[in-house]
Structures are given as structure tokens and as C-alpha cells.
Image (cartoon, helix red, strand yellow):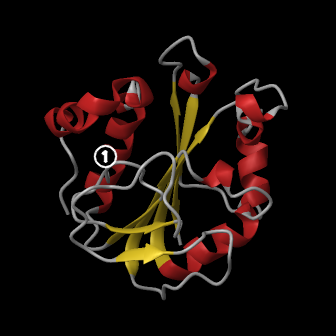
Amino acid sequence: MECISYEDFCELNKPHEDYYLGRWAYFKEVIKMVDEIKPDSVLELGPALFTLVKNSDIMRKPEIDKWGVPSGVKSVEYLHDATKMPWPVDKKYDLFIALQVFEHLVNCQAEAFQEVKRIAKYAILSLPYKWDCPKDNANYPEHHMIDENTILNWTKGEEPIKWVYIERTGARVSKGERIIGLWKF
């Protein structure tokens, strides 16, 4: 399956530059992982305005997301809240991708990770890394101080086969460091 290129990213990003500013730094690392895995089937969770893997299947909340809906989805689209188990998918994907999404599954990350294991052979998760977010609704409290231990709690101790660390890409809290994990099941 083909991933978006930097040129694709720039074109898709034009109307949303502030939101996507700096994200290519971790997108390109995820694309390297996808290229190594060479999946035939991909499910992306909550891809916002575009998918990283062209023609991947997606799962997104049934209601309209304030972060947007990918345009031109030509594959399977599951309208399902990922905090509700079980997911409407059976073991059919080579790869599951969730970029800056898993932290939003508040108090359901461990159950959601078990669903990921059930439906996919590999998983790539990108998360905010050690963001010092005040505990108020204006500052993304679900992003606060996520580290390897937090992630391992969500995965019930299942270590990824690879960690990748991405440096800060801007001054705002939302442009902080990221951590990417790659799991093989």
C-alpha cells in the first residue's frame, strides 16, 4: 500500500497549516515503518482530515469530529466509537495505525489495545510524549505526561519492537515531543 508523499502532505495541509504544522516530523517516521512492514491491509483510527496510507480503511466516531473527516475515502469506513468494545472488525488487517488518537480514549486505552491485538498483526501508535499540560479542559488534560510506563500500562506490559522519539516541532503545547511505538502480535 502506498503512503502519502511530502508533496501530498503539503497539498492536503494547505487549508489547515496551523493544525498540521510540524506533523511531517512524525508522519515520515511512521511512513518508514509502514514501508518496512509492507502491509496489504491497513486500518487507521481517527485520521482527521486525511489518511497516511492511501486507500486505507478507517474507523472514526459516528458523529462529525471537530478535527474533520478524511475526504475522498474510497475504502471501508467504520463509524464506531473506539471506546466501545468490541470493535466491529475481525482479525483482518496487517497494520493498525493511530496517530495522536489513543490518548483520547480516556480510561479505555487498555481495552482498546486488546482490540488492536485482536484485529491486526502490527500496530503503530503515535502519542504526545511527556507534555506538561495543565489539568483543565483548555489544555488537553488527556495529553499530560504520557511516557513509556503509561503506554505499557495501556498495553498490559506488551513492549513494542521499536520506539521512535520525535523532538518538539514548535512552541505551543500541541507541538511537543512525540513517541511512536511499533508492535508485532
Which of these two is toward me, 64 or 81?
64
Side of 121 relative to 174 (left or right): left
Taking the view exactly as shown, the residue that stands out farthest to the top is: 171
**Residue corresponding to mark 1:** 31
Q: What is the three-letter code of the residue carrying label 1?
A: Ile
Which of these two is toward me, 32 or 42?
42
> From the image, which quarter does the N terminus lie in?
bottom left
Query: Is residue 120 placed above or below 155 in the rendered structure?
Result: below
Q: Position of residue 163 (x, y in %)?
A: 55, 42
Q: How many marks?
A: 1
Query: Is residue 82 placed above or below 139 in the rendered structure?
Result: below
Query: Is residue 138 placed above or below 30 in the rendered structure?
Result: above
Q: Residue at x 82, y 32 (%)?
A: 136
Taking the view exactly as shown, the residue that stands out farthest to the right is: 135
Which of these two is toward me, 62 or 113?
62
Side of 154 relative to 43 (left or right): right
Q: Quadrant of residue 115?
A: bottom right
Q: Residue at x 25, y 63 (%)?
A: 38
Taking the view exactly as shown, the residue that stands out farthest to the bottom is: 90
Q: Position of residue 53 (x, y in %)?
A: 27, 56
Q: Position of residue 12 (x, y in %)?
A: 23, 39
Judge the density around disc 1: few (<14), some (14-19), many (≥20) Cα neighbours within 10 Å: some
Q: Quadrant of residue 27?
A: top left
Side of 131 relative to 56 (left or right): right
Q: Residue at x 48, y 59 (%)?
A: 64
The secondary structure type at the circle numbered 1 is helix
Q: Position of residue 154 (x, y in %)?
A: 74, 59
